[in-house]
Each structure stands twice: as structure tokens, then as C-alpha cells.
């Protein structure tokens, strides 16, 4: 019963979505730093400004097929 109420709550769903986005950003930051090296403040700013969870997931999948942060951040 309580789970059904939480699942129906738009506030709860928004909180979950925000957490998923933040986690995807953190994962992408770690993967990118390992693959491309350190980030600039501008790169980190662009990464953390990306709020589209699906795009972040595409970026995670693509990180090993591109050579630079610039290419990665250009992922549609």
C-alpha cells in the first residue's frame, strides 16, 4: 500500500529522477576522467548542466568510442 502511494507521488518520482540524473553524471565524470583525463571547470559545468537522463545514458555508452570530452559532450 505505501509503495503504491509513493509510486503515485509526483514529488517522489521527481526526487527519484533527480537522483538518477545525479548518479549518471557522477558515473560519467569518473569514466571520462579515467578515459580522457582531468576535466576543466567548463567541462564539469557542461556535464552537470546536462539533465536529460537518456542523453546521459547515451554518453555513458559512448564514452569509450570517442577521444575527447568535447566529442562526448556533443552526444545528442
Image (spheres, helix red, strand yellow):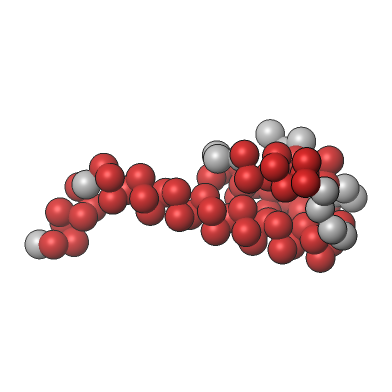
Horizontal placement of 20 versus 4: left or right? right
Q: Quadrant of the N terminus?
A: bottom left
Residue 8: percent from left, percent from top: 20, 47
Is residue 13 shown left or right of residue 9? right
Residue sticking out furthest to the right: 67
Please indicate whether residue 38 sits to the left or right of residue 49 in the image.
right
Residue at the far front: name it.
41
In the rendered image, is residue 72 in sight? no
Instruction: Name the quadrant of the C terminus.
Output: top right
Q: In the picture, residue 52 is in which quadrant?
A: top right
x then y, percent, for residue 57: 60, 50
Q: Which of 42 and 28 is in front in this view?
A: 42
Residue at (15% x, 54% y) in the render: 5
At 16% across and 56% down in the image, what residue appears?
4
| Any part of residue 5 in sight | yes
Q: Which residue is drawn at 53% across and 45% down?
A: 53
How many numbered badges does the structure rendering display? 0
Give me the residue at 42% from left, 49% from top. Answer: 17
Amino acid at each position: 500500500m505505501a509503495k503504491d502511494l509513493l509510486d503515485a507521488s509526483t514529488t517522489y518520482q521527481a526526487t527519484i529522477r533527480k537522483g538518477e540524473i545525479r548518479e549518471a553524471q557522477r558515473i560519467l565524470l569518473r569514466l571520462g576522467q579515467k578515459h580522457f583525463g582531468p576535466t576543466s571547470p567548463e567541462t564539469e559545468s557542461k556535464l552537470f548542466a546536462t539533465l536529460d537522463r537518456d542523453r546521459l545514458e547515451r554518453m555513458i555508452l559512448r564514452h569509450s568510442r570517442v577521444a575527447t570530452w568535447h566529442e562526448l559532450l556533443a552526444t545528442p
